[in-house]
Amino acid sequence: MKLIVNIGEIVGIVPEGVLRKQGAEMAETGVLKDAWLAIEDGLINGFGPMGTEPAGAEEVIDAQGGMVMPTFCDSHTHIVYAGSRDGEFLDKINGLSYEEIAARGGGILNSSDLLHETSEEELFRQAMDRVWEMMAKGTGALEIKSGYGLNPEDELKMLRVIRSIRESVPAVVKSTFLGAHAVGRGYSHEEYVQTVADMMPQAAEYADFVDVFCDEGFFTVEDTDRILTAGAACGLKPKIHANELAVSGGVQIGVKHGALSVDHLERTTDAEIEVLQGSATMPTMLPGSSFFLGIPFGRAKEFIGAGLGVALASDYNPGSSPSGDMRFVMALGCIRMRLTPVQALNAVTLNSAYAMGISDITGSITPGKRADFILTHPGWTLTKIPYTYQTPFIRQVFLNGQAL
């Protein structure tokens, strides 16, 4: 048994069996001051106030008053990509929109061309650099999408790289087949939709989920329905890109298919809130994309006020959110979306774990879950983390009970 003692405060304590927070629950988190936490076989064995700690620990770590919180869970990333799109960064500075860059053959298609020319081994190397950076900044679970292959051979190459990442790191890694990210070069729209549908049996050998970019200029509700139906026949549960560029109907088709999450939601109406109420689908907002592209931030407070839960994720990708820093995502949730620090904590931990289907094993400080947590330097509080959002706060990151 490993024992952490003299913890100034544990935050993110959630009772066993609670898989997500919704509505007023978003403003609640369990807190224990002056505490200890025990780890055994990679799991949280228990915690309690100092003076009640168990004897016989094989290793004792003195937290020296530091705070313990769950590691971040990032339920939406595109970190398997080749090279950089910093040239498009200059285009954005010069006033071109995301849609205009895509129309000129940039954006996703540019990443597809680069990926095609890059070996599987080099893709893995580049992606692993990003994963280790994310873990060092406190992320303990992440979802990774394909979607820069845009043909069967290169999409499967990406899915194999994601599998290799999962086998190589202590973080929890989930895989999503996003063949329908854009229409691949050389295909008509109809040909490509059919190609993606036909790929499902092969993709299901690697992926946990299927995703579609259901938005203006990309894939329609009808395309999405067809692709998700094909995915469901192979056991792939949906996670949908929706309402980034327009009110697309993606939320509605996602809920119809029992999507685990509908992601982006920068442009929503009350109709999207209404269809999500009573569903098992997690609304997931990506403030890093709003920040980088200068588009609206999701209506998180209105969703919560309507009784819904909200997750926040990084959308780490080379074109619209080139950062996997979930502490910054949490800060944007507070600064730009007006969430309280507790609401933001729930959004970047338990609810984002739920959006990957793993909130039963990580995402909170709960006995029996993986011992995935951040130990801060002394003097830190939950509010200070998004407030002084650039000051280093992490002393150690523990994943599956082991310090990185």
Image (cartoon, rainbow, N blue to C red):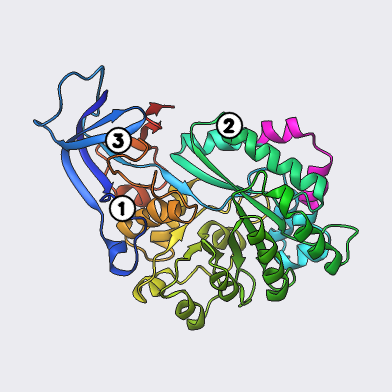
Name which quarter of the figure residue 341 lies in.
bottom left
At x 82%, y 43%, the residue is 116
Name which quarter of the figure residue 233 lies in.
bottom right
Alpha carbon of mark 2 to alpha carbon of mark 3: how far?
22 Å
Residue 77: % across, % down: 59, 50
The residue wearing badge 1 is: 17
Q: Which quadrant holds the N terminus? A: top left
Work out whether mark 2 precedes mark 1 in sequence or the reverse, and give the earlier one.
Answer: 1
Answer few, some or many: residues within 10 Å of disc 3's Cα (few below 14, many 20 plus, some between 14 and 19).
many
The furthest residue to the right: 186
In this rendering, does residue 41 appear at all?
yes
Tell me the element at label 2.
helix
Main secondary structure of the magenta stretch: helix
The answer to whether residue 100 is above or below residue 270 is above
In the drawing, what numbered circle is on residue 44? 3
Residue closer to the observer: 388 or 402: 402
Tell me the element at label 3.
strand
The furthest residue to the left: 51
The residue wearing badge 2 is: 167
Residue 304: % across, % down: 37, 70
Which residues lie in the magenta part?
110-126
Name which quarter of the figure residue 354 lies in.
bottom left
What amino acid is found at the position of numbered circle 2 in the picture? Glu
In this rendering, does residue 377 appear at all?
no
What amino acid is found at the position of numbered circle 1 in the picture? Gly
Residue 237: % across, % down: 58, 58
Q: Is residue 42 left or right of residue 156?
A: left
What amino acid is found at the position of numbered circle 3 in the picture? Ile
Answer few, some or many: residues within 10 Å of disc 1's Cα (few below 14, many 20 plus, some between 14 and 19).
few
